Image: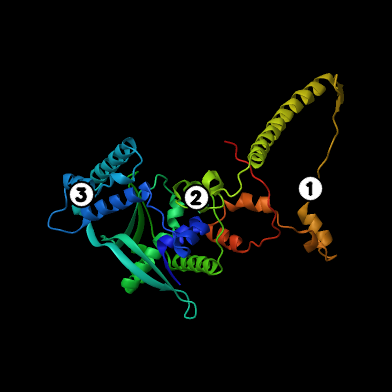
Amino acid sequence: MRISYSAFDTYQNCPLKYKFQQIDLIRTPKSKEAVFGTTLHSVMKFIHTPGILSPTLDQAMEHFSNSWNPAVFENPDEERAAFSQGVKIIQDYYNRNNPADFNIANLESRFQIEIGESDDKHIISGIIDRIDRTEEGWEIIDYKTTKKMPTQERVENDIQLSVYLQAFLSQYPKEIENLDKIKVSLYFLKHGVKLSATRTKEQLKKSEELFLETIKLIEEQKFEPQVSPLCDWCGYQNICPMWKHKFKETRKIDTEEINNAIDEYVNLKSAISLTKDRLGKLQEIIVNYMAQEGVERVFGESGIVGQSLRRTYKYDAKKLKEILEPLDKWEEILKVDGIALKNILGVLPLDARHEIEKAKIVDKETKSLVVKKK
Ligand code: SF4
């Protein structure tokens, strides 16, 4: 199959959004954030387009102003705030960088690379924002206009940068021997911070594997919705099963009975959790009182509250194994503790986490109601 990096990224964030966008081909208007990002990318291209003299800050501002599209904003205040933010980003960029200092090799270069084995080949396409020649070697840069910055660890494993590096290597194959001299960077324009890393051949292979796994999921038509903060910027909310009920006009059945049932359910659920909290507090007061009085039961107008002792046991795993293994019963009592596994996942290396994720199989599937109170 043919897939662009941005479509792959969409699938990673929400498979259902990918389906709406890439398979059903449902078009949505570009969000103001996307338009803002495109404008700043165009300014960055303008600033770094090689010429006799690099553009001055004033010229960059003029380019920004000319590329500005006020129509995407909901009101003049919002537009003013976004414009000021753009101005600040460009000023900051000039404060931190002198465009004349960079040796630009390519800007907004389009690529298409093949991945996979001969009987299962796929093409990835995309655009690399910028490639610089540096003193040590090369630097591949992607600009970001997101508010949130990732950790350095994420940049070390960022799949986009690995794909871009592979695309670069398809043009400069000899550079595979100089991977330690090729920096891959994400430049966060809103923060004025660039996070960089390098890649090893193994990391490149791993990212290709991840890409192929994702392609397999797409081919198997796995398109589950993935609710996340990114839903706030998704143009498919009114057709997405996770959101469309919010839009009254999309409801087929909209009765008082069901609306009351939803509200009552939410209220009862929150009353249960308040009751649980209160029960915990009351228990603490009563247990302290029992200890002070030296009693095991207390008597009130409404009833009697008594303490009972409950013991939980744990076994010495080593000793247990010594006893049960010769009897061929050890494996029978071993069960992977999902909660314990989840607790240690965070400290495992990314490779191990990935392998564990692959080892996951659905045991059983049940639906339950989850409440989010307004
Ligand atoms: S609204 Fe959220 S869950 Fe629904 S398609 Fe968009 S991103 Fe996915």
Kind of residue indicated by mark 2: Gln
Label drawn at residue 63: 3
For the question of whether residue 147 can be seen, the reply is: yes
Ligand 1 contact, mark 2 (Cβ < 8 Å): yes
Q: Is residue 285 left or right of residue 131?
A: right
Tell which of 63 and 357 is nearer to you: 63
Label drawn at residue 90: none
Q: Earlier in the sequence, mark 3 or mark 2?
A: 3
Marks 3 and 1, how far apart at CA: 69 Å
Q: Earlier in the sequence, mark 3 or mark 1?
A: 3
User: Which quadrant of the view contains residue 277?
Assistant: top right
Label 2 environment density (alpha carbons within 10 Å; few <14, some 14–19, many ≥20)? some
Whether label 3 touches label 2, CB < 8 Å: no
Label 3 environment density (alpha carbons within 10 Å; few <14, some 14–19, many ≥20)? some
What's the residue at 33%, 63% (across, down)? 127
Ligand 1 contact, mark 3 (Cβ < 8 Å): no
For the question of whether residue 243 can be seen, the reply is: no
Whether label 3 touches label 1, CB < 8 Å: no
Tell me where residue 321 appears, x and y as whole percent: 79, 59
Label drawn at residue 314: 1
